[in-house]
Image: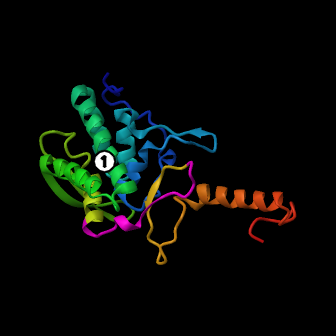
Amino acid sequence: MLPPMLSPGASASSPPSSLFAFVGDRLWLDFANTDDVRRVEGVRRVDVLRDFDLFVAWLEAASVLDAERAAGIRRRAFQQPAGAAAALVDARRVRAALRALAERGALSIKVRDDALAEINRILGRSAGTRRVEAHGDGSYARTFVSVGDAFAGLMLPVVDSAADSLIEGELARVRRCSDPRCPRVFLDTTKNGRRRWCDMATCGNRAKAARHRRRVRDGGQPVGQPVGQ
């Protein structure tokens, strides 16, 4: 079944970018985290690779695509639904390899080799032009403009990010969130290497609240005393 497509010129119906989690500190880790389908604060998170438009919305939220290019990709998807469907399948394949790399790559040569094969497969087929572009806020970013197949370059910035982590030897610092209910992965950039949570505002605070409840239950702290005191 082909992924849902927008009509030409239609605006994206994807969820707002606030529903996307960017906690990995590396683009490839944030992409691996797009399979997070937990319920967070009453909002049902969805698999970002559920359909092509969600995929494009994530790429735009991650600053891989600007608004103009995202609109162009959506128009091309409407014109070439089979190509968009193939690109989505390919993105899921890459994500599976990157998820394995994040969780087991530091310990498994086979996992690293499998991920490297996927990275080189994407790098090898992507033809186009690299550019540095200025953003309205004064920042700059590298971009890739594909030549020919409009879908071929979509995953290039993601695999470039994974390649950089391999080259820089960062796998030993890749962690999975300490909350057993949370599948998110991230790069621990702290000096002491002791970051435990993907995000203190969610998983970290839940863990603090759980510890507080245990202390209250065990009689170690009065019920009315604030957490952390």
Q: Position of residue 85 (x, y in %)?
A: 27, 30
Q: Residue at x 63, y 40 (%)?
A: 42
Q: Position of residue 190 (x, y in %)?
A: 47, 73
- Closer to us: 137 or 169: 169
| The N terminus lies in quadrant | top left
Q: Which residue is mark 1?
A: 97
- Closer to us: 109 or 133: 109
Residue 112, compared with residue 3, is above or below; it is: below
Colouring mode (rainbow / by chain / secondary structure / one colour): rainbow
Report the amino acid beneath label 1: Ala
- Quadrant of the rendered structure where residue 196 is? bottom right
Residue 173 lies in magenta, yes or no?
yes
| The C terminus lies in quadrant | bottom right
- Closer to us: 91 or 169: 169
- Quadrant of the rendered structure where residue 129 is? bottom left
The region drawn magenta spans 167-181
Q: Position of residue 217 (x, y in %)?
A: 82, 57
Task: Classify 10 Å Cα crowding around label 1: few (below 14), some (14-19), many (20 and above).
Answer: many
Kind of element beneath mark 1: helix
Residue 103 lies in magenta, yes or no?
no
Q: Is residue 189 left or right of residue 219?
A: left
Q: Residue at x 37, y 60 (%)?
A: 26
Q: Position of residue 89 (x, y in %)?
A: 28, 34
Q: Is residue 209 left or right of residue 59?
A: right
Q: Residue at x 25, y 45 (%)?
A: 154
Residue 207, compared with residue 155, is above or below; it is: below
- Quadrant of the rendered structure where residue 219 is? bottom right
